[in-house]
Image (cartoon, rainbow, N blue to C red):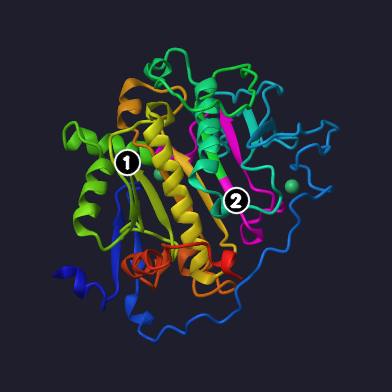
Amino acid sequence: MPENILDDISHRRYNPLRGTWLLVSPHRTKRPWQGQQESPSRVTLPDYDPACYLCPGNKRAQGDSNPQYKSTFVFVNDYSAVKEEQAEYKQAEDSKDLSSLLLKADSVTGKCYVLTFAPNHNLTLADLDPSRILPVVQAWTEIYTAHLSPTSSLANVAQPTTLAPSGISITAPNAQYRWMQIFENKGAAMGCSNPHPHGQVWTTTGLPDEPAQELEQLKKYRHEHGGCSLLADYAKLEMEKEERVVFQNKTFLVVCPWWATWPFEVMIISKGHKRALVDFGDDEKRGFAEAIAEVTRRYDNLFETSFPYSSGIHQAPLEATEEEIEASHFHMHFYPPLLRSATVRKFLVGYELMAEPQRDITPEQAAARLRDCGGPLYREAL
Ligand SMILES: [Zn+2]
Ligand SMILES: [Zn+2]
């Protein structure tokens, strides 16, 4: 079994989704596990904070008031990274000019939203039952649908649903945007300044680097291996191997990927070839909400703390060729920085910045620990 040898020797692992490598040094984790070194953290936040710009009824920076929302609420970010309207910019095209060769720029317009996950200031996804995460999945689906290009073959596949609408309202964007990035930054360690449970949705005219790189790899795989999807094949393989599987239900697989960079990085992968949120029926949305609940609760249980991470969804671009749509395979990444406890984190520094990512604890060890952290949320018993 070559995989057993890899438990002892330093080696590189290939990430087929990005076409990159990472260095794994498992021999450095031979020292015994020190166990829990800090006392479990409790939630000390209030259910409602009059100073929070996301709590129901409160005023935001630019004077708008939040409604008394009951589950989710979406609004255009008061400090958007990209805007719908701005001055025109077009770089002069002169192939002999060094500036146009080395100082390239491209204008980007778009729209950025903030989406709250719950009205309660002191809850996180880890505290929410799948039934309370479902409206978030519904809201993501509604936002994605509202921005899909009318010429996309995905524009007409919306599945019939008996789920209640999320209650959010979206005004149509001024232009057709290419990409929608749904993401969450959780915890001060990830630079999140407000603990109120929320995520963001940024739409842009261009395709950003990470999804562009993945899409190239997904297209290449389809081209080289027939009509299959890299991630559907990968999910099937991981279900056979089992050692990196954290959790699964009928429709979704949660794994610590073979090529994970972060110590407890996981991916939620659709088992079937689903290209985007609009491909999901009610059961699949429930399955996705359950997978998110399982990941976030296990994360919190692992070090008995509110576990920081950045997570994000990759799916078909809003405006895409048929080839790009078919190559897309719905998945969600979780990149958490913690390594050994609530305060000992991994940094991507030195070798990682100058050469390539490196990790000590193997994804197989990480998956085994996350498998063992199921059960009720630790702080319910405090
Ligand atoms: Zn709040
Ligand atoms: Zn991805």
Q: Is residue 114 visible?
A: yes
Callout in the foreground (1, 2): 1
Q: CA distance from mark 1 to mark 2?
A: 25 Å
Q: Position of residue 53 (x, y in %)?
A: 78, 43
Q: Secondary structure at mark 1?
A: loop
Tag on residue 176?
Answer: none
Quarter-of-image position of residue 72: top right
283 horizontally vs 142: left or right: left
Residue in the image at 63% along x and 37% along y: 71
- Label 1 sits on residue: 251
188 horizontally vs 177: left or right: right
Q: Secondary structure at mark 2?
A: strand
Q: Position of residue 64 (x, y in %)?
A: 82, 30
Residue 28 sits inside the magenta stretch: no
Residue 195 sits inside the magenta stretch: yes
Quadrant in the picture for the N terminus? bottom left
Tell which residue pokes out farthest to the top in this image. Answer: 151
Read off the magenta span: 184-212
Q: Position of residue 298 (x, y in %)?
A: 46, 61
Please state which of residues 247 and 27 is positioned toward the viewer in this rendering: 247
Tell me: residue 116, above or below residue 321.
Answer: below
Q: Sequence order check: which comes first, mark 1 or mark 2? A: 2
Residue in the image at 64% along x and 33% along y: 112
Tell which residue pokes out farthest to the left in this image. Answer: 1
Q: Amino acid at mark 2?
A: Asn
- Label 2 sits on residue: 185
